[in-house]
Amino acid sequence: MEWRGRTCSHEQLRDWRPARQPRRLRHQQSVIEPPLMHTALVRWDRDERCLVRRVTRDACDCRAKCRTEFSRETWNAAVLGGADRRPEAALIRAECGGGAQASCGDRLWLRRNPQATTRVAEEGPLAVADATALRREEFNHRGDRAQHEALHVRADHPHRGSVLHGTYGGCTAYDMSMPTPARTIAISATPLAGVTAAEWERLLVANPTATAFSDRAVHAAWWNAHSDTAEDVSLAARDAANNELLGYLPLMKRPDGVIYSGATFHIDYATVLLAKTSSAKEDDVAAALAGALISTNAPLNLLRLRNEDTAHARMISAITRAAESTNRTATFGIEEPAPFIDLAVITTFDEHLERLDKKERHEIRRKLRRAEAAGVQISASKDLTTDLSEFIRLHRARWGESGLFTATDKGASEERFMREIFSSAPAGMITLLLARNEEFGTFAAGLFLRDANALRYWNAGGDIAARALSPGVLLFAHGLTMAISEKLPRLDFLRGNEAYKYECGAVDAQVMQLQVPT
């Protein structure tokens, strides 16, 4: 490109520094002294996304301040540097005079007083999420702060660029940029098989408050075991431009015609996976999923929702708004408690016991001493698939016909589910504790799930003959010690208000339910 009578590259233009400060600014002590020079590189890709690179120079002391704005995280240095320059005519034409430089597409213009900025090629749709959003930028110069403001694109001219104007020390600087268009989201009915493991994992990583129940292995095992009891009517949200998965809402329709949270039969927490919203004012992914769900006109009973899960909270708000817009009533309430022990400031098991009442603390320590005297040893299973049979035996011994693994088709489905999750879950997600001694052999088993936010006590079983050894307290104590040693922030007892949970020092978190009748 040509600039001031000579040919130079973008990099040379970026690195240019004036030889000295303009004379007309040297004696202006009452205003900001260093003038600003802006270099803007404006580029568009074929999906009408804008890329702006602006380099700001402090001409007085030659300190460089650079900022690059990307409309998408996938932009790379080659595109930024112009190596992927489009052969078509420039999309933006700016007619200005003097002052700083603006490079738009393949052309270079000087600019001082903006006269026109028009889009002259590929007049495709350009959606602007907030056409009148006020943009503010702050610059620091020798401890003084100056600000300049401008309105972005006007609502009646969605294809027109914006000109940002500011005066510093008697000189004028303009910043020309283009808005990033709002993405178009496509919603489709997508069963679990329609989402790849890589897509699921990427969304799961983007939802740090999700639990171990949101792992894809849990959902795959559940549907393989219980597909005859429900229909998979899950919804997927994808970017219409590149088919990127932006959100997934597992849902199931039971024989009663009601749509429930997907794969939640004998599962303690629901799964909602949402990408980060593209706007601070509107949650486009959750809104699109909620709109599609409400448009089914089916009764909804979304169970196992958690206030602590950010994606759950986003979905609850979006469904409530979507229901109100169609004159349907959304009722949000408590399903049941899920007690937990907060371990954020706890470093040893004894520290937790000190928080309990004297009677409860004494009782736990007495039972632990009795088990030690009886030669009880507790260890984690080294072969989950092999030890699953022992867990099922002990669960049946403790719970009988009221438990999971009954001598029925339902019990057989639960056993299939458990066998598959034991064999397919990621390493480290499942821990099976087994309690043994010489008198009873293996007499108790405790099943724990682990994620970044908690160790979750999912299920247990025990031999009635060994009840005097208090297997429940032994498994709790070992599980709590394990969570503390791993520096996990809580031990979660999951759903249910059994008395022993509170005797161990747990407090309630609430599992919520969202109902929308027809």
Image (spheres, rainbow, N blue to C red):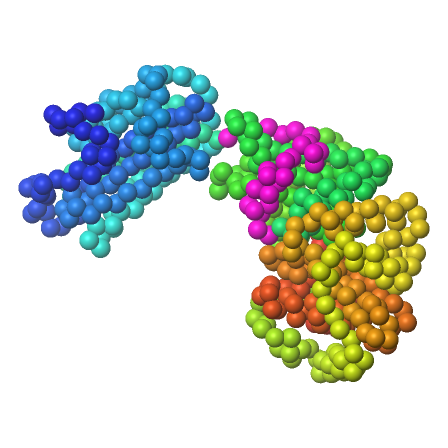
Q: Using the rendered view, name the quadrant where residue 229 is placed.
A: top right
Q: Residue 125 in the image: x percent, y percent?
A: 46, 21
Query: What residue sits 45% from the left and 29% below the top?
Result: 181
Q: Residue 148 in the image: x percent, y percent?
A: 28, 41
- 191 within the magenta span: yes
Query: What residue sits 59% from the left and 56% below the top?
Result: 452
> In front here: 485 or 435?
435
Query: What residue sits 32% from the left and 16% below the top?
Result: 89
Point out the image quarter for the C terminus: top right
Q: Residue 253 in the image: x percent, y percent?
A: 78, 36
> In front here: 261 or 450?
450
Q: Residue 168 in the image: x percent, y percent?
A: 19, 42
Left or right relative to 327: residue 129: left
Q: Is residue 457 depicted above or below 33 in this figure? A: below
Q: Which residues are magenta?
A: 183-209
Confirm whether residue 213 shows in the render.
Answer: yes
> In front here: 476 or 260?
476
- 413 within the magenta span: no
Q: Using the rendered view, name the quadrant where residue 402 is placed.
A: bottom right
Number of numbered callouts drawn: 0
Point out the image quarter for the N terminus: top left
Left or right relative to 99: residue 251: right
Query: What residue sits 85% from the left and 53% below the top?
Result: 404
Q: Using the rendered view, name the quadrant where residue 348 is placed.
A: bottom right
Confirm whether residue 291 shows in the render.
Answer: no
